Image (cartoon, rainbow, N blue to C red):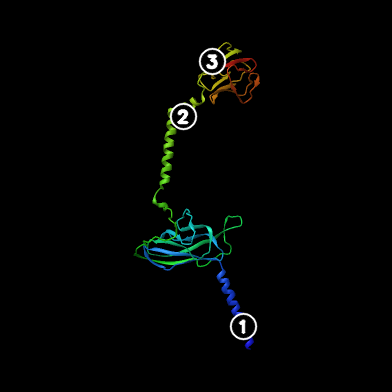
Amino acid sequence: MKSVTALLLAILLTFTVVTAVNAQSTEGIWLTANNTTYKTGETVIVALNASSATPIQGFTFQIRYDPACLKPVNAASTVPGMNALPLPQISGLADGSYASTTPQTVNGVLAEIRFTSLKGCQTNLTLESAALAIRNESGFAAPLAGVIIGQKEIALSVDKEVGVAEAAQPSGSILPLDAPPAANRGIPVWTIGLLAFLLIVGILFGAFKFFGIGSSVAQKLSTPSQTATLEIKHGPRAGQSFALNKLPCYIGRDPENEICLNDPHIIDQHAKIYSANNGYYLMDLGGETFVNGQAIRRSSANLKPGDVVRLGKSALFVFGS
């Protein structure tokens, strides 16, 4: 009987030791609070805790809160080498991230998170997510696997009686947790600035269009400084010379063209001459167009002084400048 009892005690002792070892080696994160009762205006402080046998190089957390009851202020970590990494904040969610260049062993408080109580209310702080970060084999940050999130929620009671906010600044690496302004507080300043900028651009564009400023500047940049001419050598209007004062200059059988050539082998709008890059160009518009004997079909060719242009079967002119 005594041997059986001794055996049972040995088994129980072994189970207790194994359980204790496993509990100590478990990687975990949890929330705690020294105080859960506050007055309006007082500083609410909760702690993010962690236990890890594996040295870490960072941690993250997201704590859900009621923006009608609480306003996030900051987080502070006293873990050696942990530096705050500011993140854009969303109203109702305090989002924190810390990183270290060297691995750190943690077993206790990772960071203290501070809020200001806004009014009398019953509310909760909830650890929405949290992670411990390590450097993987490739040298990149990665979450530590197997981390258990323990206590996630802290119930708070805020009295409507006004108290005094904590004056002392927290020690360690401080992370601001200021939430963005509420949407009903008016139009953001950057929006007003953007609207003013667009209004000014619109006014300037209208003035440029109305007074022809933009077109005159563009014309000065693209039009050659010296006026070119076309001298008709053969065909209708042979012997005449035309100064290219107006560009683009359309050539064809239609009388509406700048240069009208009444020739059955020339179509209504046969070609056009235009300026670009401080030079002159001839574009074929669907007829038979040649520059120095080379056919130009639905494309453009650069014109140089002395170039011979043929339209249709027999209309020839020489380009000069």
Three-letter amino acid code at disc 2? Gly
**Considering only vertical position in the picture, is 12 above or below 39?**
below
Which residue is pictured at 39% across the width and 51% down the height?
185
Q: Label 1 crowding class (10 Å Cα cut-off): few <14, some 14-19, many 20+?
A: few
Residue 183 placement (x, y as % from top left): 42, 52
Report if the CB atoms under discs 3 and 2 are less than 8 Å apart: no
Q: Which residue is mark 1?
A: 8
Residue 7 in sight in this render: yes
Q: Which residue is mark 2?
A: 214
Which callout, 3 or 1, points at the residue further toward the start of the chain?
1
**Considering only vertical position in the picture, is 162 above or below 211?**
below
Three-letter amino acid code at disc 3? Phe
Is residue 87 left or right of 11 when viewed as pictured? left
Q: Label 3 crowding class (10 Å Cα cut-off): few <14, some 14-19, many 20+?
A: few
Report if the CB atoms under discs 3 and 1 are less than 8 Å apart: no
Query: Looking at the rendered structure, which numbered label has been put on residue 261?
Result: none
Q: Secondary structure at mark 3?
A: strand
Residue 269 in sight in this render: no
Q: Label 2 crowding class (10 Å Cα cut-off): few <14, some 14-19, many 20+?
A: some
Which residue is pictured at 43% across the width and 28% down the height?
211
Which residue is pictured at 42% across the width and 42% down the height?
195
Is residue 271 left or right of 191 when viewed as pictured? right
Q: Nearer the viewer, residue 283 or 33?
A: 33
Residue 312 placement (x, y as % from top left): 63, 18
Viewer-side label of 1, 2: 1
Q: CA distance from mark 3 to mark 1?
A: 119 Å
Query: Looking at the rendered structure, which numbered label has been put on residue 242?
Result: 3
User: Image quadrant for the N terminus?
Assistant: bottom right
Viewer-side label of 3, 1: 1
Q: CA distance from mark 1 to mark 2?
A: 98 Å
Q: Secondary structure at mark 1?
A: helix
Report if the CB atoms under discs 1 and 2 are less than 8 Å apart: no
